[in-house]
């Protein structure tokens, strides 16, 4: 499941340390160093240093003195080599509404191998031809690493997986390791990406949704009953029901993740709705009853409907909470969060809400 989620987010590993620097030589030392350091963190497995060999390259070192003997300077020679190996856009032709560049390029057989590049014919300003090897030294660099960039900055990504521990505690340990003296030298810096970054972005969005749900529920209660104390008592009941969510997650050993936070947000709506049913029953009672008696009567009248609704919802979510069936692992934290919140909301709505209404003086007509 962890691998599947990672593949969907384009980062197979939950741990991704992005190291940025302008020095390619620094990457060759820093990548393995960081990988070895985090490999000793408990729970971190399958660490990769981020250095991916891309193949061999040719390095062309121009000799200015030899170039001067051919009546060319290094800048002119560099431009001629670039035009010969990469081509140059000499003109443009119109294709429909767009202009398409026409690239002039040397034949492929003249630049196919290192020997062909060394014998690449170049033309001096006076018109004579000379091979590239006469004015430059060509060296083959074996096993050059792949160059990766993010936001136009060169970087490598040290990655790893997690086994037997939660993501939050592992990331805390990794931050301590990376903050160690001499781990990240001057001229380089790092950021954390991967599944950890995706989780932080999702948590920030879900927290905004949760706060918006609480505020909208409070505004709805104010609009329905036009009494601040009533809305406050009902909102207190809703927020206290969330303690059941945390208690249920702790008892079952379930981490707080995106799915469980969605369950917390749903509990806000469910408990608020049940509280509205209770208070609507209270207001529908004959006006001659004392407030204390009316609160008890409303609880008795709504006991069976609230119990039936709560029990039906819990039974419907129980297979997901127990992890029964394919794909249930994805929704298990959601089901546990909702069931735990429902267990807490049942006594809170029938006992806690009447107490809040009476303490705040909201039960008086």
Image (cartoon, rainbow, N blue to C red):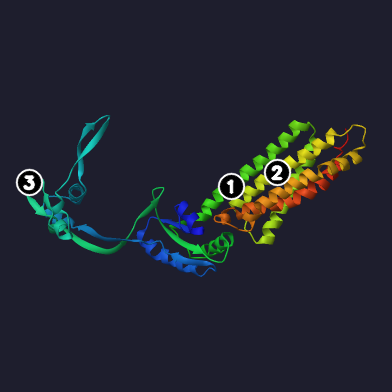
Q: Identify the residue shown where x is 9% and y is 53%.
A: 130
Q: Residues within 10 Å of mark 2 (few under 14, many from 20)?
A: some
Give left or right: position of 136 versus 1: left
- Between marks 2 and 3, how big is the CA–CA gap? 86 Å
User: Which quarter of the image is occupied by the C terminus?
Assistant: top right
Q: Identify the residue shown where x is 73% and y is 45%.
A: 309
Question: Which residue was labeled with disc 1?
Answer: 204
Residue 191 appears in the figure: no
Q: Residues within 10 Å of mark 1 (few under 14, many from 20)?
A: few
Residue contact at pointers 2 and 3, CB within 8 angstroms: no
N-terminal label among 1 and 2:
1
**Nearer the observer, 144 or 27:** 144
Q: Position of residue 350 (x, y in %)?
A: 82, 46
Which residue reaches farthest bottom? 40
Q: Which mark is residue 50?
A: none
**Nearer the observer, 337 or 324:** 324
Mark 1, secondary structure of its residue: helix
Give left or right: position of 333 versus 8: right
- Between marks 1 and 2, how big is the CA–CA gap? 22 Å
Q: Which mark is residue 270?
A: 2
Residue 316 appears in the figure: yes
Q: How many marks?
A: 3
Q: Which mark is residue 127?
A: 3
Looking at the rendered image, the disc whose residue lies closer to the viewer, 1 or 3, is 1
**Nearer the observer, 169 or 269:** 269
N-terminal label among 1 and 3:
3
Q: Position of residue 54 (x, y in %)?
A: 31, 59
Mark 3, secondary structure of its residue: loop
Give left or right: position of 116 versus 307: left
Q: Identify the residue shown where x is 56% and y is 51%.
A: 200
């Amino acid at each position: 499941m962890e691998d599947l989620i990672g593949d969907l987010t384009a980062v197979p590993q939950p741990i991704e340390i992005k190291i940025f620097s302008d020095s390619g030589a620094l990457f060759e030392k820093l990548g393995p160093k960081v990988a070895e350091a985090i490999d000793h963190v408990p729970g971190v497995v399958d660490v990769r240093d981020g250095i991916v060999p891309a193949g061999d390259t040719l390095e062309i070192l121009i000799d200015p003195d030899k170039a001067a003997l051919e009546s060319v300077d290094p800048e002119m020679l560099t431009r001629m080599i670039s035009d010969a190996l990469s081509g140059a856009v000499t003109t443009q032709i119109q294709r429909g509404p767009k202009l398409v560049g026409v690239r002039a390029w040397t034949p492929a057989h003249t630049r196919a191998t290192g020997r062909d590049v060394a014998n690449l014919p170049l033309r001096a300003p006076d018109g004579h031809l000379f091979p590239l090897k006469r004015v430059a030294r060509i060296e083959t660099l074996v096993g050059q690493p792949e160059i990766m960039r993010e936001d136009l900055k060169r970087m490598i990504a040290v990655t790893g997986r997690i086994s037997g521990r939660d993501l939050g505690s592992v990331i805390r340990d990794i931050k301590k390791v990376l903050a160690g003296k001499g781990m990240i030298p001057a001229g380089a810096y790092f950021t954390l990406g991967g599944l950890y970054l995706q989780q932080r972005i999702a948590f920030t969005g879900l927290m905004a949704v949760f706060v918006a749900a609480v505020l909208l529920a409070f505004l709805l209660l104010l609009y329905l009953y036009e009494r601040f104390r009533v809305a406050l008592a009902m909102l207190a009941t809703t927020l206290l029901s969330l303690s059941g969510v945390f208690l249920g997650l702790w008892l079952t050993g379930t981490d707080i993740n995106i799915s469980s936070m969605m369950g917390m947000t749903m509990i806000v709506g469910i408990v608020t709705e049940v509280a509205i049913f209770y208070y609507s029953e209270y207001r529908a009672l004959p006006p001659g009853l004392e407030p204390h008696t009316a609160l008890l009567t409303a609880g008795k009248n709504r006991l069976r409907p609230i119990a039936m609704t709560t029990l039906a919802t819990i039974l419907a979510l129980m297979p997901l909470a127990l992890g029964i069936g394919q794909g249930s692992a994805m929704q298990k934290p959601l089901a546990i969060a909702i069931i735990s919140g429902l267990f807490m909301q049942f006594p809170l709505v029938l006992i806690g809400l009447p107490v809040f209404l009476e303490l705040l003086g909201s039960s008086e007509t």
